[in-house]
Image: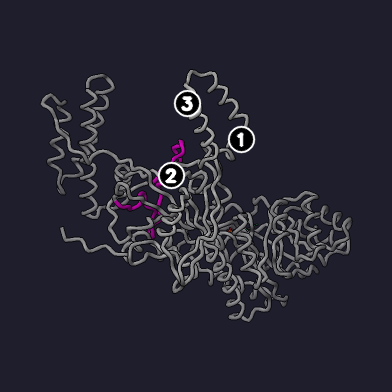
Amino acid sequence: MEKLKRYTAKDAEETYLVPHWAAGFFRVGEDGQLEVTPDGNGGPSASLYEIVSDLRDEGRPLPVMLRFPQILEARVVELNEAFAKAIRKYGYKGEYRGLFPVKVNQRRMVVETVAKAGKPYAHGLEAGSKAELALILAQDTHKEALIACNGFKDDDFIRLALMGKKLGKNVVITLEKFAELGRVMRLAAELGVEPQIGIRYKLKAKGSGQWADSGGESAKFGFTTVEIIKAVEMLAGAGMLGSIAMLHSHIGSQVTDIRRIKQAVREIAQTYVQLRKLGAPVRYLNLGGGLAVDYDGSKTAFYASSNYSLGEYAEDLVYVTQEVCEAHNEPHPHLVTESGRAVTAYHSVLVLEVVDTIRPPGEESVELSKDAHPIVKDMYDLTKSISAKNYREVYHDAFSDKDTLQNLYDLGLVSLRDRANAESLFYQIARKTLKLALELDYPADELEDLQKLLADKLVCNFSIFQSLPDSWAIKQMFPIVPLNRLDERPTREATLVDITCDSDGKFDRFIDLHDVRNTLPVHEIRPKEPYYLGVFLTGAYQDVLGNSHNLFGRIGEAHVTVDEEGYDIERFIMGEKARRVIEKMGYEEGELAESVEKLVRSSKLTPAEKGSFMEQYARELVGYTYLED
Ligand SMILES: *Cc1c(COP(=O)(O)O)cnc(C)c1O
């Protein structure tokens, strides 16, 4: 075998596809540590490994979420600048008025940072519920910035929106269904406010990828063309046609194929033109969300990817809208998108520590005694005879030997030791088979089962259900990279499991440019040396959708900024303590402690034991819910 070349940081970038998915915010440093460059390539950098080590030195427990406000700001700026550039390029007459849909991440730091970075661009906020509107109205946004109210509405939601308008905010009430129109008209009259109405149009065009069904004729939200005509007539009848300000649509999140986007823009732009012809003075054309994130870096229409850039997205929206408007001699509307995923995904990194490795057998040596079962002896001979010429037959034989032995074991004809030896030998053969097949460039899909069988399982101190719910619920993939030793060749292949008692709490699909990988390349873990994995692009939806399965609570988070001088951990927010998670289930901390105290008092423990147990119980209630040593 040829001697292996030295493995460098550059090699690690390709192993983990970092330049493909990182959008310029992350890279591998020469010293083999993963670095963040929150102002983009060329800006200052910091090692994630060092940040995590500092947090550990401060005594902060893992898992932890690292948030980089600069990345959020950069994304807001990139989005607005992409539209500004497209608008200049085509000489478009309207402006871009982006909205951040807070449902994607309502964390205070996220909303406040987006609002601040968006202020110079009059970037607005979108609410999908009363509670979201309540928090949005209190934000410091530009006077012209839109505040859109989507989602199903009751009278209170509409009143709150109308009050916002009265207070001078540029609030638009998006009607999701026809019945909301009557409510808005009645409440606007009651409060003496002229409303700004948006109409959500049910697109025929469907998205692509995971959320294809959010659009199309069977979608949950939106007006049919018949209802649009009825709404126009009703408003015209009341002398309120002037209040129709926006036409809205949303084809679903993570639209991976640019052709679907163009198709949707064409359709909504035509509807804009038609609405104008009916006399409705629509000024804003809103394409909703859908701007995708290239999680696997493959630049394809695969569900974890995106076959277009931000620049192309902006150009297509501008160009297609302009083309449709000019053909009908209608003015260019202000363009609105509600891009949430693309704004927030990059800003946070989930940091996990590997706490244990579960290894399949087959790496230990096997000594057979003279009275070993003949089938076991046969398997032993197979381990000696396997070669590049015969490995497929040998593997097949070993597989059937193992099966036979299992049947005999069930009948009580084989000892536990024989069975254990057979298992070791089978795995030895499987490992040799995989090695030979890989050397011979065997087609990868035929090796899939073997790779899965032989992968290490890294036990990581976290809960998928709390921290990466989409990876469980919809098989969403996220890039995962060790935070250091990236100048060392990874020699093991692994899947990840979390510490919940749920067998779904695992990660066994990893990003790849052409396919999906079953395993992640990792390093041999050294005793007493922490091994951290970063899970990237987790800033959209994961923060809010997570639940407390097994009572693992919200994790701690650190807000980190980076400049030429180095990095600064500006703020650390503690994760939920056990008592908080328990109380959410309806228990009272005091009552629990009282019941336990009763139990202790009536026990036969010594006074010292009683004291020490009660002290430990009290400590548990204020402790972190994850493993702490
Ligand atoms: C969820 C949602 C969005 C956000 O979509 P992204 O794909 O995350 O940008 C925008 N608009 C509406 C109406 C939504 O429901």
> Which residue does the image show at 48% across and 18% down from the upper left?
604
Q: Is residue 536 magenta?
A: no
> Which residue does the image show at 68% across and 74% down from the upper left?
325
With respect to residue 433, does 37 lie above or below? Answer: below
- The kind of residue on which mark 2 rests is Asn
Q: Quick one: quadrant of the N terminus? A: bottom left
Query: Circle 1 sits in a helix, a strand or a loop, which is it?
Result: loop
Q: Position of residue 109 (x, y in %)?
A: 60, 58
- 343 vs 206, nearest the viewer: 343
> Which residue does the image show at 27% across and 53% down from the upper left?
491
First in sequence, mark 2 or 1: give its number.
2
- The kind of residue on which mark 1 rests is Met
3D distance between C-alphas at marks 1 and 3: 32 Å
Q: Is residue 507 magenta?
A: yes
Q: Position of residue 243 (x, y in %)?
A: 81, 65
Q: Quadrant of residue 577?
A: top right
For label 2, the residue is: 461
Q: Quadrant of residue 455?
A: top left
Q: Is residue 258 visible?
A: no
Instruction: Point out the residue furthest to the front here.
Output: 608
Looking at the rendering, the stretch of residues picked out in magenta corresponds to 496-523
Which label is found at residue 585? Answer: 1
Q: Is residue 146 left or right of residue 211?
A: right
Quadrant of the image where one finds ligand 1:
bottom right
First in sequence, mark 1 or 3: give its number.
1
Please name which of the two marks, 1 or 3, marks the residue nearer to the observer: 3
Mark 1 and mark 2 in contact (Cβ < 8 Å)?
no
Q: What crowding class fits label 1: few (fewer than 14 Cα within 10 Å), some (14-19), or many (20 or more)?
A: few
For label 3, the residue is: 608
Q: Position of residue 378 (x, y in %)?
A: 14, 32
